[in-house]
Amino acid sequence: MFRKVACIWIASAAMVYSQSITDAYREPAGQILGAALTDVEGWEKLEHLTTEIGHRLSGSPQLERAIQWAHDRMEREELHVRMLPVKVPHWVRGQESARVVAPLERDLPMLGLGMSVGTPEGGLSAPVVSVTSFEELEALGREGVEGKIVLFAVEWMGYGRTVQYRSAGASRAAALGAVAALVRSATGRSLNTPHTGGLRYDPAHPKIPAAAVTVEDAAWMHRMIQRGHELRVHLDMEARQLPDADSFNLVAEIPGRDLPDEVVVMGGHFDSWDVGQGAHDDGAACIAAWHALSLVHRLGLRPRRTLRVVLWTNEENGLTGGRAYRDWAGDAVTKHAAAIEMDGGAERPVGFGLGLRGPSGDGTDESYLEALSILGEVGTLLDGIDAGLMERGGGGADIGPLMERGVPGLGLRTVGEHYFDWHHTEADTLDKVDLQDFRKAVAMLGVVGYVLADMPKTLPRTN
């Protein structure tokens, strides 16, 4: 806890226009950086969330407990707080297991994919066919796939290219008559750790159960099959879909002193998968954005626009929170000056990526040049923590609906060295988060959020 600054620092329009953004905001940025880089309370919040509440799947009691805890604490911090109702999918994993039953017997560590259907009661057993691409799957045809479990033993090609097998593999296999799908976990490194994540069923094909297996076991099963063995697996999954549940987007803000109807919004998604503690994905981001707002408030820095934090619900298996926020904002979306999301883990941060798009498509080169010129000056305020990078290409899933309406979107960037080692696993726990990296994220969100909410000239929008 530190002393609230008695005098509110206000940069007048004349001052900002006659000085660079860097010079005009050096003093408040220094206050935010100094507070964030020595802070202990933000980490205590993250420790409470991950240790005493843990993972927070949409529809679960843990998520609702986390929302209520954050709401009550935000009120004690004298932030303006509200809970916006959202209906969310309610998928339940249940008990699950996988086991090789021939030509030898051994258990397979696994995690059912989110939104998967379950197996018939008692499970199912079937021979396994292994492919390394959709092209190989199609080449097998119905004759080679029908009645079998398809294993997608796909090498890591980066998340964007590899995740398609997790999201679409089950339906592609079902189209050829497969009874289940197993997917190599979407990661480049593994210590025999399976990674879950969502799938999307194609309504044109039957829904079949699908699960992720470890990198090691996917490679082993593929080799066994390549060496001529007929591999048989027993899969047992109780996964089921329940009626949609009630949840909330949690909103906290500092009302703008001059232009309260104009908004800079920042945040992350409060839900997580039902494994680990949801520390990197996305608990640290939520706490960082929330605590950045708390520090700005305690410092007495009230920007000319409203600075708002949203802890979005249901990013992992539905994205209903992001859409519900846009619908709640309605026509006021046109007065959102910027949207900032952190959803790439809390490793060492390096800067922000900018996305400009709208109903008519991506922003022009001229609009990007103008926006990046402004952001470059803001980024200079973060050079002291080596986090001033501002580059084209950014946004986030939760702010995507806002960006589609023309709101400039920024995504916090990190070095991204280990995020996908822990992503959607039991290993996404607090011990993987570095205190100083977390503090830097708090500082970055505080500085960039405050400056964008206070400076007279806003970033260009896309029509």
Image (tube, rainbow, N blue to C red):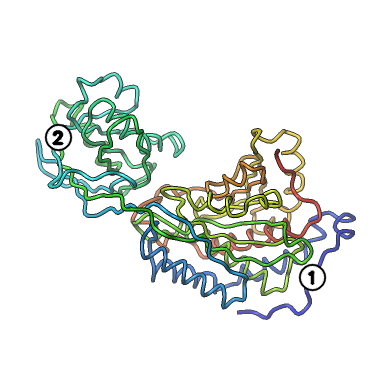
On the picture, is 144 further left or further right than 383? Answer: left
294 shown above or below 117: below
In this orientation, which residue lies closer to the viewer: 253 or 111? 253
Q: Residues within 10 Å of mark 1 (few under 14, many from 20)?
A: some
In this orientation, which residue lies closer to the viewer: 183 or 246? 246
**Which amino acid, by three-letter code, is at mark 1?**
Trp
Dot label at residue 126 = 2
176 shown above or below 100: above
Q: What secondary structure is found at the residue carrying circle 1? A: loop
Dot label at residue 326 = none
- Image spot of residue 100 (x, y percent): 14, 41
- Image spot of residue 357 (x, y percent): 65, 38
Q: How many marks?
A: 2
In the picture, which quadrant includes the C terminus? top right
Dot label at residue 9 = 1
- Image spot of residue 241 (x, y percent): 30, 50
Q: What secondary structure is found at the residue carrying circle 2? A: strand
Please name the residue shown 63% across and 59% down the image.
445
First reached walking from the N terminus: tag 2 or tag 1: 1
342 shown above or below 149: below
How far, Cα to Cα, is label 2 from label 1? 69 Å
Q: Residues within 10 Å of mark 2 (few under 14, many from 20)?
A: some
On the picture, is 452 further left or further right than 59? Answer: right
In the picture, which quadrant includes the N terminus? bottom right
- Image spot of residue 137 (x, y percent): 29, 24
**Which amino acid, by three-letter code, is at mark 2?**
Ala
Q: Quadrant of residue 451?
A: bottom right
On the picture, is 427 further left or further right than 18? Answer: left
The answer to the question of whether label 2 and label 1 lie on touching residues, with beta carbons closer than 8 A, is: no
Please name the residue shown 54% across and 62% down the image.
438
Q: Quadrant of residue 132?
A: top left
Please name the residue shown 23% across and 27% down the image.
177
